């Protein structure tokens, strides 16, 4: 089968896209804080080992990418809920397995293809052109040789070749497209009776005896949790930056570099004429607008003033009054297509029609000049802060290694590391396994605090990474085991929980009664009044309808169709705690004939892509099932 896949491959363009996305992380991910010693094995795939060092490096890279996506403020416990370590290991196992299969099938990437991919990376470019010196410098900064990098790239490209070969086999048949469209555009008419939580709450009374009995039946849920107080050392580039000295000579050098950098950045004055077009305009409409734009361009090139034409025809009312002038335009201010066209023009030159989501533009570059740097007084603080942070980041890795070494070699105290490094031993409030404040808001800190080494053996923890260039080492100062509570301590909590449970039960019972009576022929308006509910006459719902509670809409579309002579009913708990009893009145499937050819083609492509992904997942599962894979039991 895989040989057939290979024969179907038509090129490397499809998988280069994925490589372009992933390679910056491969180059600039976080590095290990410290190394040395014998490298252990994270997994073995058909005898080929994945080292623990390689696993740690890839885990750190993906963790940093996730952290960056959250702006450096990752929700507590996210990585544990994601099981990121398990995911990373499985990804590495799969890549190793795919590389083995690719080798067996003789898949190759030529030197010319590899060179073209590498030359396309902006990281290796100078003034828009590939620069071999920049290329080598970037690799050296990461401790890599060009041979190492090119071997990794070649392997990644071959794997992408194999993946693309499977994924591109997906297709969608017309019958499936019709079926999905009927479901997507399906409408359902429902009537419902809404039962308010507050009405049920008025019928529920909880005595002290009820609450006490509930407490005794659920005593374990009310136990005081096990908790600890922590001592810890924290090291961060942000704190280190505060200690970095900055002389006046350094400030002058930083400002000179800033001036040179800014003056090399162009700014342009621009004018434009806009012919508006809807984003979903058809080809005929677009071509008509393009022809009109060419006519306008010809008029201007024949001598008619750009400003005059802009005032007459431009659909941008703001700039049209100024003869199309937009003023100074810096990079990043306009949409990509507009900016690319503008920065390709010489002063006075007019572009060909340029399509953006706003319509078609004729763009003229009025002036091109260097950007002017701001005075030192206005940028001094920013330049100094950037310099200090950069220097601190350079210091951080050495100090992190020192912190890890001292706290490991002297595991019974944080004091030696604090004294050697000038750090302050800090202290936490009480921390449980489920929650904590400060550094203990991070689930990894809590996990380490309650580990056998830290809690039972009272040793320093390993160094814990809390964010970009921020680490801590912790140890337990005080420990309180879980303990039973007296009823008086949790009276309010027990009463509240039991009350909520009784309210839910009362609503469910009422909903069952309403369903039974409604199905037996009771008049819904009268029935709703008898149970203190609100009757809503039949309404037509579409999937994702935003004017009704989402739980109600989802329940309506999850119902089976009514059978002849018998209506379909269901009940559902709404987001605010209310409950609704629904009766399905009618179902109207969508009409595939109403789909445009463009929408049909788009849906076919999505289905083909999804099916191709399913095929790839199936192939991967089969390969993994047949492989000899051993995983390390300890990835912490």
Image (spheres, helix red, strand yellow):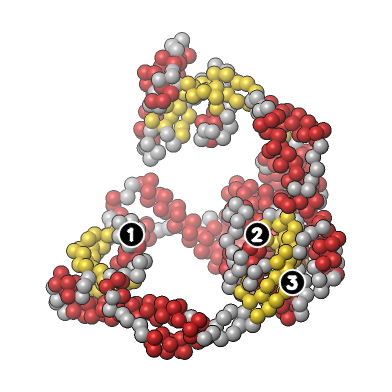
Task: Determine which quarter of the picture holds residue 340.
Answer: top right
Spatial CA span between label 1 and label 3:
53 Å
Q: Secondary structure at mark 2?
A: helix
Task: Tell me if residue 317 comes above or below residue 461 in the rendering.
Answer: above
Mark nearer the viewer, 2 or 3:
3
Spatial CA span between label 2 and label 3:
24 Å
Given the current orientation, which residue lies at the most extreme top position?
303
Residue visible at 46% across and 10% down in the picture? 303
State which tag comes first along the sequence, 1 or 3: 3
Q: Secondary structure at mark 3?
A: strand
What is the x, y in percent for residue 291?
40, 25
What is the x, y in percent for residue 517?
18, 79
What is the x, y in percent for residue 628?
69, 75
State which tag comes first along the sequence, 2 or 1: 2
Residue visible at 41% across and 25% down in the picture? 318
- Which residue is tagged 3? 475
Q: Is residue 159 visible?
A: no
- Which residue is tagged 2? 63
Quadrant in which the C terminus is drawn = bottom right
């Amino acid at each position: 089968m895989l040989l057939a896949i290979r024969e179907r491959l038509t090129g490397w363009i499809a998988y280069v896209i994925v490589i372009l996305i992933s390679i910056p992380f491969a180059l600039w991910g976080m590095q290990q804080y410290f190394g040395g010693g014998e490298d252990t094995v994270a997994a073995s795939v058909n005898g080929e080992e994945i080292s623990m060092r390689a696993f740690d490096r890839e885990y750190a890279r993906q963790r940093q990418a996730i952290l960056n996506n959250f702006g450096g403020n990752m929700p507590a416990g996210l990585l544990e809920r994601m099981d990121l370590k398990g995911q990373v290991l499985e990804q590495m196992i799969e890549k190793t397995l795919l590389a083995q299969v690719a080798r067996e099938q003789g898949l190759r990437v030529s030197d010319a293809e590899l060179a073209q991919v590498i030359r396309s990376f902006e990281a290796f470019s100078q003034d828009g052109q590939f620069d071999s010196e920049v290329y080598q410098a970037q690799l050296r900064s990461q401790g890599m040789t060009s041979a190492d990098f090119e071997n990794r790239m070649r392997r990644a490209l071959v794997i992408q070749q194999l993946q693309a070969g499977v994924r591109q086999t997906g297709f969608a048949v017309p019958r499936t497209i019709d079926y999905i469209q009927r479901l997507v555009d399906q409408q359902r008419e429902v009537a419902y009776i809404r039962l308010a939580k507050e009405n049920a709450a008025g019928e529920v009374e909880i005595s002290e005896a009820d609450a006490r009995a509930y407490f005794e039946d659920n005593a374990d849920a009310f136990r005081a949790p096990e908790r600890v107080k922590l001592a810890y050392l924290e090291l961060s580039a942000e704190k280190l930056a505060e200690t970095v000295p900055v002389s006046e000579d350094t400030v002058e050098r930083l400002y000179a570099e800033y001036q040179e950098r800014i003056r090399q950045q162009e700014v342009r004055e621009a004018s434009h004429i806009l012919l508006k077009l809807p984003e979903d305009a058809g080809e005929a409409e677009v071509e008509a607008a393009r022809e009109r734009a060419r006519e306008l361009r010809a008029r201007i090139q024949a001598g008619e003033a750009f400003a005059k034409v802009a005032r007459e025809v431009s659909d941008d009312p703001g700039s049209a009054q100024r003869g199309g002038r937009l003023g100074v335009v810096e990079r990043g201010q306009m949409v990509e297509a507009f900016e690319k066209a503008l920065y390709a023009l010489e002063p006075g030159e007019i572009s060909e029609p340029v399509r953006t989501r706003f319509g078609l533009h004729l763009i003229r570059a009025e002036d091109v000049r260097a950007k002017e740097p701001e005075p030192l007084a206005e940028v001094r603080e920013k330049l100094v802060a950037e310099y200090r942070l950069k220097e601190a980041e350079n210091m951080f890795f050495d100090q992190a290694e020192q912190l890890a070494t001292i706290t490991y070699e002297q595991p019974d105290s944080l004091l030696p590391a604090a004294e050697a490094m000038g750090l302050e031993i800090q202290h936490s409030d009480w921390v449980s396994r489920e929650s904590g404040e400060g550094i203990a808001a991070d689930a990894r800190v809590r996990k380490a605090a309650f580990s056998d080494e830290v809690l039972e053996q009272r040793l320093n923890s390993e160094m814990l990474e809390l964010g970009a260039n921020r680490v801590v080492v912790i140890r337990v100062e005080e420990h309180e085991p879980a303990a039973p509570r007296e009823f008086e301590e949790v009276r309010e909590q027990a009463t509240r929980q039991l009350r909520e449970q009784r309210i839910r039960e009362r609503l469910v019972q009422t909903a069952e009664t309403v369903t039974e009576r409604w199905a037996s022929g009771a008049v819904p308006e009268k029935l709703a009044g008898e149970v203190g509910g609100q009757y809503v006459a039949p309404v037509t719902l579409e999937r994702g309808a935003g004017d009704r509670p989402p739980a109600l809409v989802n329940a309506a579309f999850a119902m089976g169709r009514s059978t002849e002579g018998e209506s379909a009913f269901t009940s559902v708990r709404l987001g605010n705690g209310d409950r609704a009893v629904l009766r399905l009145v009618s179902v109207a499937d969508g009409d595939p004939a109403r789909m445009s050819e463009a929408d049909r083609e788009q849906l076919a492509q999505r289905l083909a892509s999804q099916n191709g992904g399913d095929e790839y997942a199936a192939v991967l599962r089969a390969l993994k099932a047949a492989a000899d894979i051993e995983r390390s039991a300890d990835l912490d």
